[in-house]
Image: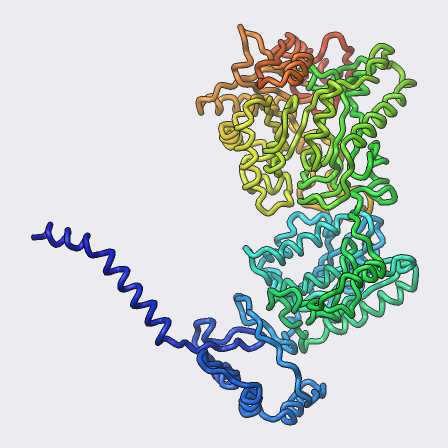
Amino acid sequence: MGEGALSTWHEIRFPLILGATFCYVYWRYCFYQPRATIPKKGGRSARESGRPPSDDEDDEDDDSEDYDSTTEKTGKESADAKSKNLGSPSDDAATSTEETGTPVSSAPTKQKKARQVKVFTRRAMKAGDTRLLNAKSDIHIFYSTLTSTTEKYASQLHSLLKSHPVLSTRNITIQNIDYLDDLDSHFVTPARSLDESFYLFVLPSYESESPLDYFIETLKDTYNDFRIDSRPLRRLGGYAVFGLGDMNGWDHMFCYQALLVDKYLGKLGAPRAFPVGTGNVKGDIEKEFKEWSDHLFDTLADPTSVAEIPDITMSDDESEEANDEEEFDIVDPASVKISRTTKANDVVDVEDMGAIIQSSKVTSTKKEMVGKDSPTYASLTKQGYTIVGSHSGVKICRWTKSALRGRGSCYKFAFYGIKSHLCMETTPSLSCSNKCVFCWRHGTNPVGTTWRWQVDPPEAILKGALEGHYKKIKQMRGVPGVQAARFAEAFTVRHCALSLVGEPIFYPHINEFVGMLHERHISSFLVCNAQHPDQLARMNQVTQLYVSIDAADKESLRRVDKPLHRDFWERFNKCLDILKTKKNQRTVFRLTLVKGFNAEEVLGYARLVAQALPCFVEVKGVTYCGNSAPSGPGASFSKGASKDTLTMANVPFYEEVLDFVKRLNEALADQGLEYDIAAEHAHSCCILIAQKRFKIDGDWYTHIAYDRFFELLESGVEFGPMDYIAKTPEWAQFGSEQAGFNPEDERVKHKSVVKREMKLKGSRSSSEASLPVMIEVS
């Protein structure tokens, strides 16, 4: 019986379901007539939000127009209905005059079409809404600077607030936007502690690339990102912006970056506490700044209210938004300026396009990453860089100088056979997407998450890099101790380390650039920071491919690398997955150990190695290059500096690096991975772990047969890492007496090192193993 009923159900269930569905659809179409309400301008009704309406909202809903979906109203009927519900125009005008002090014309106005309202977490505000000022609200001053001019006025604003009779009781801070540890915590997902706070900005405007460009891009991306709250700054107490610029000969872009910041802060929901102010640095800027600050202080000290701007994010239609904000028209310098008489919805005749283009004062050309007249250019050249084109650079390192004098090469010679005096260190992109705490440049190079600059051709970059490198080699001819043979060899570059500064893989034509290196039989050693998975996936064959692994978990990576991408951890892991698929490449993990930051995460690093299975793992102690607080143009401040600054206390001793490597090697073995310690370079505080397949008959083969590599590359056949290996010399292998120092070179030691060795009676394990990173004198 049961089986028969079940069989019958299986036979008729599909017709029954289809029939029920058809009946429901027919009923909805023919008989169900829902009422649709037009949301009142400025927010959602109680019906929309799903909560019980208040008394005030009931009254407002009664005054709104209701449209039946089956009823068509003529213009006359609509006007009658509006007159009946809302009162006469004269009454309306009288009410507006009484409440706002502004007379309203009684003439009929053109009815605008209803907008589609975005759903927010609170009621959107109407023009004229006010917010009571909190007398204890914090005040945060932000500024950006390259030449310290803006810092001067920001500091002046800070001093004036500190001495103000009313405002001085508040918590007042000053920070440089360029060096904020985390922009998101202030402008994307502000902490609750920032509620009711006031943001004051003192900003410059630069025609060349500056860190302020990245801040503006962050605000734009936040506004256009549908995945996050579109009004994250709505809980602020208010904001105000003062811009500095040069009106002489630059009037069409005068203070344009300050205006853009003001615009997008408003778009993100922040209430404007005071209109944007501007000052001409070639004019009477002191008077202009004082006038703006005096009025601003009066506003902040007034305990009554701050008027909130209308919700300009209510429409997805950019043309409607443009009409509503016509008086607030900000033109980006990279866009074409069109006459205000041309409305967004107007159709422009083809014959009129020429006149519009001719009337434009701004071209569509992109900025240079490092313009020759920019402070960034001056700072980098002062540090010894030769800037190539608009976004590339070349520099000779101390190991090149050391090798020319016969005083040793860097760890790459011990590990892979690269002679330092034949190596050129360059980058086709000075920009980076991280702000690492151990960066050699301390934040003086540009940053960004997308390429927004002019693009130089790869052949011009290679030519300029070689010329710049050879020019710096020539400067070594008079240095005492330079060997004539090595000096002559140095004018034929055989290796290129694409790791100078910035992110080489960020350059749009990186594959073409590497191909040109290979055409000249110059090997390529490319380092990336695991933040650009798409570019990494498209990367062609290189001699050796590095990925910097500076932390083993998300929070540590955020603290050490200070990545600019919001999805930095997802990008990081995606890069590791991509690296695992590149079986034809010699792949390397590069771990930079920083005491107090990332030197204890052994198991985490082991898991990352298991995820990507690189051929080699380099573990190196961080090199101390001075205090990592911001330096360079406009960075004489201390207020906006990162709390995570480095000192010599963060530099590990060689014995500490060795202990970490041994523990990591054990953790890899516990996971069943075939790795072992292969080579060392003690005076660089660097040790190499390699896959055991590179150990043949008891000897390590981590060196590269460069001629064989180019032979295979030019043959067009597929090949892998094991096809161009060479034997690692005895003095470079782990545990050798030389500890990675070439016996053919002369080792010159600092007096303190000699003294220490004498004290420890020449014990290598206790003397050389205990040397800090920067003890060699070259």
Residue name at image x 70 percent, y 13 percent: 741
116 vs 106: above or below: above
Q: Position of residue 50 (x, y in %)?
A: 43, 72
Q: Locate residue 755, reporting x and y percent.
A: 75, 17
- Residue that extends furthest to the top in the rendered view of this protein: 697
The x and y percentages for residue 320 are 65, 69
Asked if residue 557 is positioned above or below residue 154 in the image, the reply reads above
Snapshot quadrant of residue 284: bottom right
Instruction: Residue lying at the far left in this picture: please name it.
Output: 1
Comparing 57 with 165, the one in front is 57
In which image quadrant can residue 466 be found? top right
- Whether residue 178 is visible here, answered yes or no, is yes
From the viewer's perspective, is 298 left or right of 221? Answer: right
Please state the horizontal and vertical placement of residue 129, each as a whole percent of the image: 63, 77
| Figure quadrant of the C terminus | top right
Residue drawn at x 75%, y 71% as measured from the top left = 327
Left or right, residue 353 beside residue 251? left
How many marks the image carries: the answer is: 0
Left or right, residue 15 beside residue 123: left
In the image: residue 432, left or right of residue 281:
left
- x 85%, y 59%: residue: 358
Res. 704 in view: no
In this figure, which colouring scheme has been used for the structure?
Answer: rainbow
Q: Can you say whether 506 is above or below 770 in the image?
A: below
Name the quadrant containing residue 25: bottom left
